[in-house]
Image (cartoon, rainbow, N blue to C red):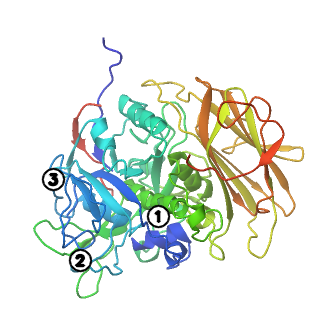
Amino acid sequence: TVCSIEPRAQTNIRNVEAQWITQSYKEDERPFFDTGLRGEGQVVAISDTGIDQNNCYFWDSTTQASLLFNPDARKVAQYIPYVNDDDYIYGHGTHVAGTVAGKRAVKGDIESNGAADGLAPHARIAFLDIGGPLGGMRIPSFDRVMSTGRPHAKIHTASWGSDFNSYTLETRAFDQYMFDEDDFLLLVAAGNTGDNNRLNTVGTPATGKNMLSVGSHNNGGNSAPKNSPGVDYVSGFSSRGPTKDGRMKPDLLAPGNYVLSAGARPGEVGECDPEDGSLPRLGLKKEGLNYMAGTSMSSPAAAGVAALVRQYFTDGYYPSGTMTESDKMENPSGALIKAVLMNGAQQVRGVDNTFIGITSSKLYDENQGYGRVSLADSLFLPGSTNVQLKVFDREVVMDGNKKTYTLNIVKSEECNYQNLSVTLVWMDPASLPFCQSCLLNDLDLSLARGGDEFHPNGRRNADRLNNAERVIVGASDGDEFTISVKAHNLIGPKQKYALVATGCFKGTEEIRREPTGSSSNGGSTANGDVPLTPGDSSPTPSEGRGYPSPEQ
């Protein structure tokens, strides 16, 4: 029986500056690295053209990565040679992997700070090689892609896809995997065909509901061109939304224009930063370093940040902002990691179009989505970040019911943040290919203060399209907010979700109210007030090419 027929679109290939931009937005300040959050204990899966494992940012002089996962590897814990076991000269995959988690070790053993260290330099990599000698890509079965690094890898970044703007069988498979495997998050490059403000250019699989579709904003510091208007602008090439059915894409932005990372030189051993201390000129390559640009660079940058967010929870930094053994969260959900990243993302000013100049952009539009990644506005570190944090993971709401949470705003010397930001994320079941209305389980987020009600994503009423919803509202000392999560319409009896709030809070005195008929476990009802506590963890093969990089 033939259930569906669709065209097969061509698949295309879609750091140091990015570290401070995503962590503090203050040049050369990296508070998360300073406090010990560098990706320790995290594994990020990558599918791309290959890694030159002899480049000093991956080199392990004691062992070579293989099919078997090695938790003791210095950098590459697994390498699956689906196409081959290396990258091409200054290849795409080596650059992508270096952006996620590259860490310099000049002799392959003792690590030191390098010019191209990744966003999560102490994380490990599980790699699926899907690239040929000239950069062409051959994508294996969906199961083969998703099994990379599992169960150790909870994050996967894919800097490849097509320019097809619809919801396809491939997209459906990714969405269903994240619905079933709730500890997993996929990040996908949005694409590089947004020049001249071309809409509907985000392509599969970045058109999915559950993955993070990552666009590009300009880089800064020494990685900014002379005429750049600055970091707070969408890169002109970055693909634009919405999807065919009207959903918001990209979800957020990360640095992707002129990113310095590891450069592959197959046949050499230990290629590294130039010995004369000089870096390659902007957009060029030199010895073991390489500049590239594209959303292929922004997706791995965001994946590295996601690894730091996950480590924040697994190492027990929540809620105090300092490592506490008793606060370790064993297995945070992918929805929680996604919600934290989207909740703290910050608005950029406009779009830096190459040929038509600067054009306007605002939050939740087809250019920037929720804005640029900002850890300083996402997680709490005492004395170092802008916000305090409350999270609720793997919450459950029954169809037709509502959960409410009350938060009290208290300003202090430790926190004087002007807003309350609340984000709801849930992993939606997979839809049918070419769906015209792809959202299946529709939850509603709203905030109330006194007689005022606030709706998400810049809307005046409920969002009926997206499975991520955010409300940002100005908050004064003494304000009391009621957060509501309502199951407006589900295809099943219940839906799990993650809820994240940032602002200035009163501590442990918040309450959670659950009306009759709503319960966390789908069993007995709960009446009255209960203490508010943080949540815890209780396609066929194809031939193609990756997204062309706009700047090689």
Which marked residue is nearer to the observer: mark 2 or mark 3?
A: 2
**Residue 277's image quarter?**
bottom left
Counting residues from the N terminus, which is met first, the one under dot 1 or under dot 3? 3
- What amino acid is labelled 2 in the image? Cys
Spatial CA span between label 1 and label 3: 28 Å
Q: Are the two marked residues, 1 and 2, in contact with CB atoms closer than 8 angstroms?
A: no
Q: Are the two marked residues, 1 and 3, in contact with CB atoms closer than 8 angstroms?
A: no
- Horizontal and vertical percent position of residue 387: 68, 65
Q: Is 527 on the left or on the right of 364, as rendered?
A: right
533 vs 459: above or below: below
Q: Which residue is identified by label 1? A: 218
Spatial CA span between label 1 and label 2: 25 Å
Q: Could you tell me which residue is drawn at 59 percent across and 60 percent down?
A: 349
Checking the image for residue 272, the label placed there is 2
- Horizontal and vertical percent position of residue 494: 62, 29
Checking the image for residue 134, the label placed there is 3
- What amino acid is labelled 1 in the image? Asn
SS class, disc 2:
loop
Q: Is residue 243 visible?
A: yes
Counting residues from the N terminus, which is met first, the one under dot 1 or under dot 2? 1
Taking depth in this image into account, of 269 and 534 the one nearest to the observer is 534
